[in-house]
Amino acid sequence: MSSHPRMKKGRSGTLDERMKTLLSAVGLSLLAAQPLAPQSTGLAKGVVEENRHVLSQEQMDAAFTKPGCLDGYRPSQSGPLIPLDRGDGEPLDTTFTVEPRWIDSDGFRIRGWLYLPKAEGPFPLVVLTNGGGGDRSPTKSLSDFIAPVFAHCGVAAFVHDKRGTGESDGVFRDTTYEDYIRDTGNSAVALSEDPRIDPDRIGVMGGSEGGRIAVSSASRFPVFSFAISMMGPLQSMKEDRFYAQLNGLRVQGSSDSLLAQVEPIWRGIIDAWASDDPAQHARIDEEILAAQKLLTSREGIFCEPASATSVAGALRDIRSGRIPEGSSVVCTLTGHGLKDPDTAIKQCEGGMLTVDAELDAVKAAILNNM
């Protein structure tokens, strides 16, 4: 099997031109591949303002043109690209290597994998960020797909487990965006010292939540010379969360009148969530836990704290007069209390009651303690 086309044809054009061609092939806007202005707190503001225009037909044509390095191949979800003329049982033509790496990031070990082309370096590098959530596989799905494409076409790529997931250190529920931003930047700084990497051509790329992390990391760490955000939010975190909730209801067919009632409630909750005021957070938590306890003790409904949020909000609005007296209110409770047993145990009065694992014993324990 011959080497892949980029190696066979050799390097042509400037690095920026080759990068833009490659990025276009994987469905990215040419504008997203523009080199970053010098780092500032403006989140690459100069790049955004400079490129605020409609794409020309020439740019559109280039964006949908498949580069030569992918001729004769198709990507797989992960691993080597697959030659179109590959026979049954024929081994894959691996055009890159994958090296496991550990990155030290503020005292946490981040597990990653460096994809390197089988060619003469130094190579440009793309550090790939992860999507939202704590499930390792879906958060890395874009990275696992695109890293082999980059490496096949002569661009090194770095994939890593998000802090608190997979093999990386940390506890996911304790992680923050600040952690992800620093882990991304610290990875780039560490890899810039590898002689096989061109330190002047290191970029960062991510989709969805990872798109936000990519742009934020690029604005904070001068090691990055370009950033690529695929479907990454451009608004604040508060607006992002607010409209995600509101549009979710709209898609499900909720009326405008209902959304008008929900909007101020959610804005207040999200404002409290986004604040740096521990006392405000504690007050919200107390209201939610009080509602959970009330439902359990008065109604026999054992829900998780997240489900009790709707009841806590309704009780608050009844007290404030936002919901008129005598109104009919529907609160949806979906999660069972055993999803978060530790919180429920902390609210128990008089300690835990141990009963035999028999129906009659459980029924007696419930009825005798109502």
Image (cartoon, grey):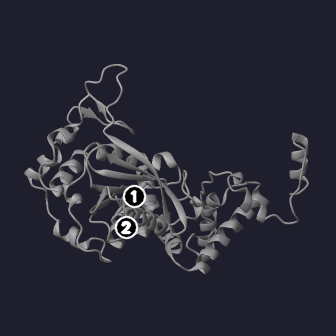
Q: Position of residue 325 (x, y in %)?
A: 62, 70
> Is residue 61 positioned above or below 296 on the image?
above
Rendered-image quadrant of the C terminus: bottom right
> Is residue 7 positioned above or below 257 on the image?
above
> Is residue 57 positioned above or below 213 on the image?
above
- Identity of the residue drawn at 84% across and 66% down: 349
When asked about the image quadrant of residue 92, the answer is top left
When asked about the image quadrant of residue 368, the answer is bottom right
Which residue bears the numbered disc 1?
210
Q: Tell me which numbered mark, 1 or 2, is placed earlier along the sequence.
A: 1
Q: Position of residue 271 (x, y in %)?
A: 49, 74
- Identity of the residue drawn at 35% across and 71% down: 221
Rendered-image quadrant of the N terminus: top left
Compared across the picture, whether 61 is left or right of 255 comes to left
Which residue bears the numbered disc 2?
217
Front position among marks 1 and 2: 2
